[in-house]
Image (tube, grey):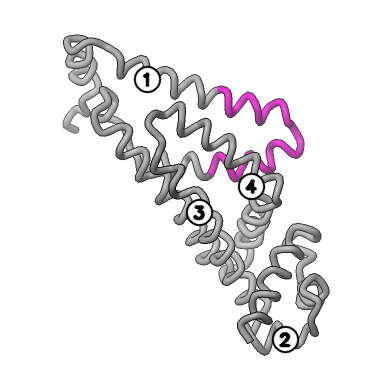
Amino acid sequence: MAATRQKLIDGALAAIRSHGIAGTSARTIAAAAGVNQALVFYHFGSVDALLAEACRDATAARVAVYRARFAQVRSLGELLDLGRVLHEQERAEGNVAVLAQLLAGAQTDERLAEPTAAALRLWTAEIETVLHRLLRDSPVAAIADPAGLARAISAAFVGLELFEGVDPAGGRDALDALERLAVLVEVLDDLGPLARRALRTRLRPRPRS
């Protein structure tokens, strides 16, 4: 029973990689899984329910692969380096494409919206933890928003999958721009005590009138 469910989950992911969300159906999933398509409905009730579980299952597994490496990151530059590696590996295996396709499907199918958002939150939570740790003592801590930055980074790396499809050079430029921002923050971290204090004062949020 469990083996069949896993075959169907793997088949759903394979169908999305091969056919996109629009071409994924009980038939294409069953063909990829090597089982009868009636088993989709027997085990999951609907194609959407299967896709939701496949999204959660696959993302949780991939996040677990990188969790120890996230914990070892010691600078924004290292975080970006890991992001590049992660993006290339996940792109090569088709996992970024799966998430991008599910996001596209969720725009018109609310049954896919929450599981896809939950999958993104798994990545975001890991990145946010790193950002909180890295920015805690930074001069930019007063204006930094680790939660918002984590969401922006997650969205950027998923969006690059679509962007690179039509403009590979533009995708590389986007990553290079992120790297320059990371270098800027690290330069600010190296300022002397007086300069850091002055910068914190300038960056401190002002009360609204």
Whether tag 1 and tag 2 are in contact, CB under 8 A, the answer is no
Q: Which residues are magenta?
A: 155-176
Magenta includes 165? yes
Q: Looking at the rendered structure, which numbered label has been put on residue 39?
A: 2
**Rendered view: 136 above or below 9:** above
Q: What secondary structure do most residues of the magenta stretch adopt?
A: helix
Residue at mark 1: 186
Mark earlier in primary sequence (1, 2):
2
Residues at marks 4 and 1, CA–CA distance in whole angstroms: 27 Å
Residues at marks 1 and 2, CA–CA distance in whole angstroms: 54 Å
Within 10 Å of disc 1 (Cα), the crowding (few <14, some 14-19, many 20+) is: some
Mark earlier in primary sequence (4, 1):
4
Q: Looking at the rendered structure, which numbered label has been put on residue 102?
A: none
Q: Amino acid at mark 3?
A: Val
Q: Amino acid at mark 2?
A: Leu
Report helix, strand or loop for mark 3.
Answer: helix
| Residue 193 in picture, x, y percent from top left | 18, 13
Residue at mark 3: 63
Report helix, strand or loop for mark 2.
Answer: helix
**Rendered view: 12 above or below 79:** below
Residues at marks 3 and 4, CA–CA distance in whole angstroms: 11 Å
